[in-house]
Image (cartoon, grey):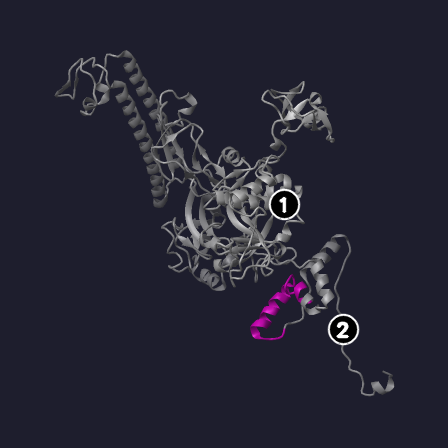
Amino acid sequence: METPYRKVSKGKATNQIDYLAADKEDTFTIAQAHAVLDEAGTMEDDLMVTRQRDDFPRKSALEIDYIDVSPKQIVGVSAALIPFLEHNDANRALMGSNMQRQAVPLIRPEAPLIGTGMEHKAARDSGAVVLAKRDGVVESVSAAEIIIRTDDAFRIAGGEQSFSEMGYDVYRLTTFKRSNSGTSLHQRPCVNVGGEIKAGQVIADGTSTENGELALGSNILIAFMSWEGYNYEDAILLSESLITDDTYTSIHIEEFEVEARDTKMGREEITRDIPNVSEEALAQLDEEGIIRIGSLVRPGSILVGKVTPKGESDLGPEEKLLRAIFGEKVGEVRDASKYVKPGTEGVVVDVKVFSRKEREPDRQTRLRELAKEKEVEKEWEAKRGLINQRKNAEIRNALLGKKLASSVSDGTDLIARRGRIVTEELLDAGVPLEHFHVTDTDAMELIQRIQQLAQGRLRDLGEERDAQIEKIRKGDELKPGVLKLVKVYVATRRKISVGDKMSGRHGNKGVVSKILPQEDMPYLEDGTPIQIIMNPLGVPGRMNAGQILETHLGRAARELGLYIATPVFDGAEEPEIRKLLKEAGLPEHGKAKLYDGRTGEPFAQEVTVGHTYILKLNHLVDDKIHARSTGPYSLVTQQPLGGKAQQGGQRLGEMEVWALEAYGAAYTLQELLTIKSDDVVGRSKIYEAIVKGENAPAPGTPESFNVLVKELQSLCLDVDLEQTSDDIDTFDPAPEDWESEHEI
């Protein structure tokens, strides 16, 4: 890994850039980027702080070999996005860098008031925003695409021709696509029809960008104060206004996958005809048994109807009897449909169906194929229309004002004689443009080139269309044994709620503990309510004072209507922040008098108040909350599985056992280690006892003990459990004269 440095020669910084690796760097004396230079690049200070291996000596300008290119070159992109990074402890800066990657894309992204100047660069280089390839004018804008009319229709490099539709640049936008982390990828146009566009300009914002700048969270009015203990241990108090305004609302898309396989018992089938399922439950499914796009689904809703053939083991005693008597297959399929899992509620935004090509496809498959083919044809027609439109416009421009080389007629009547000047009225007479021939040879060559280019582009498009249709007719490549694959995408709208994790950019993270009505939140003297309350005790111990400076500067920036960039290691300093606060008509110390929203009384002390950039992180309570009554068990140990995905139980580990032993909770401990865990017989018995209203039976042998016995047997140690009548201790009450014989 190498980093760039400016070469210094005889005390003067040159324009020569050298890239040095870490081992090479150790052999040179390097000055800091903010060393004072004059216009010619000569170092003005006699002595300056330099870097030499792990030492920082003061050296004269003549002893310096290199100078840093930028103060921020020692940090990566995510750390360079943290304002006042130099005021934060390294551990918290690391947390801030990592947590920016966990930010959830919001439906209303907002660029930070206090940035570092890297937000624009990060957004462009991420590929999230759409950049204009060439200069032009916006022809049309929609949620799905942007079309820009360019001037260089016929001077396009060969490799770019597939991008441009004959002088029209068509930019397809991503709409509500699922990311790998389950969030929504969405692009929004930020240009208007008729607007002039320059090459490299941002024409559509990405998922977490605003006007081409990275926008991971929102600028929030916060106060550092305690509130009834609800911000104990870094907990965060929110105002209800953040929910009603959808400030921290995000869209999450979940993918559900269903496969229809060819099994030993027969083929699985995706169908609407499911045994023992009411018509009401099937109401949202189409004729094929797949949920319709736009359907509202809740836990328990059917997404894809599927039946699978029953094996002998699946048949009940009655079915076995009927099969034995009549020799026919009674109720030969069982329900294997895909249901919405608990905790998911939303709208179906997309359905994808992949199927292996069969010799004789059913009616529904053929109809779906025809619909896809029509879509391809429609797209091709639209592109062909754009090309012909541009071709005709360019030919008209080439003909206008030129002298006709031959007469023009519409087949019956003479429209214009030879030698006449071509005008708009003449071109609008309804005669095909190919019939016009002019005396200007350059114009005729240009027209010929236009026609050749348009013809070539149409031919390429036709080949693309044929290839797409061929792929549709050929079928999809699926895994062996899979006949059909259906993917259903469900979008869920999630507002911020108690238990969600939030963070600033300085590693100042916390969990939402309470959401207060707006009228109960503390408010400023002008009546403005605070939006978030954070704990002041979270600052000194963590040594991330950058958040305080951001809060002060954010308040001044909001009052003055400014967006401020404070680059890493070269940002705003305390006197500059004080000056801006004064300019905004605010006290220089940055504190404000707050009033209790419940009583209207002022708080005893002034409070630090200001605007800070706060992110919502992808650690949401809806994804983590989990409960289990009964569920799956491990095959070996017969203990409940672990984790939400497996519908698992809560682990009772070694240390939890110590805690229960310390409390002397013997029966609770015995129950947890046997019937609530791996006592297979005891599980059934306790159920029967509860149903019948009887007392709980004594626990049996845990299955894990049997596993231990088997493992010992594998070591050639035979362990047997034997119980004889002599082993059983019986309770023998003391005789009546026991007290008289023994002293107490």
Say which quarter of the image contains residue 362. top left
Q: Secondary structure at mark 2?
A: loop
Q: How many marks?
A: 2
* Residue 658, magenta (yes or no): no
Camera sees residue 304: no
Q: Quadrant of the N terminus?
A: top right
Closer to the camera, 517 or 313?
A: 517
Neighbours of disc 2 within 10 Å: few (<14), some (14-19), many (20+): few
Q: Which mark is residue 408?
A: none
Instruction: Please identify the quadrant where the C terminus is shown.
Output: bottom right
The image shows residue 622 at horizontal and vertical percentages of: 52, 54
Q: Nearer the viewer, mark 1 or mark 2?
A: 1
Label 2 is placed on what type of residue? Ile
Q: Residue 663: give x, y in percent of width and height.
A: 72, 67
Of mark 1 and mark 2, the one earlier in the sequence is 1
Q: How far apart are labels 1 and 2 at the CA level?
A: 70 Å
Above or below, 694 relative to 164: below
The residue at the point 87 percent across, 83 percent down is 743
Q: Which residue is identified by label 1?
A: 545
Instruction: Between residue 464 and residue 186, name the one nearer to us.
Output: 186
Farthest residue toward the left?
Answer: 413
Q: Which mark is residue 728?
A: 2
The percent position of residue 73, horizontal first and vertical second, equals 61, 31
Instruction: State whether the magenta stretch is mostly helix, strand or loop.
Output: helix
Magenta region: which residues?
Answer: 670-695
Query: On the rendered structure, is 556 left or right of 50?
Result: left
Q: Could you tell me the amino acid type at mark 1?
A: Ala
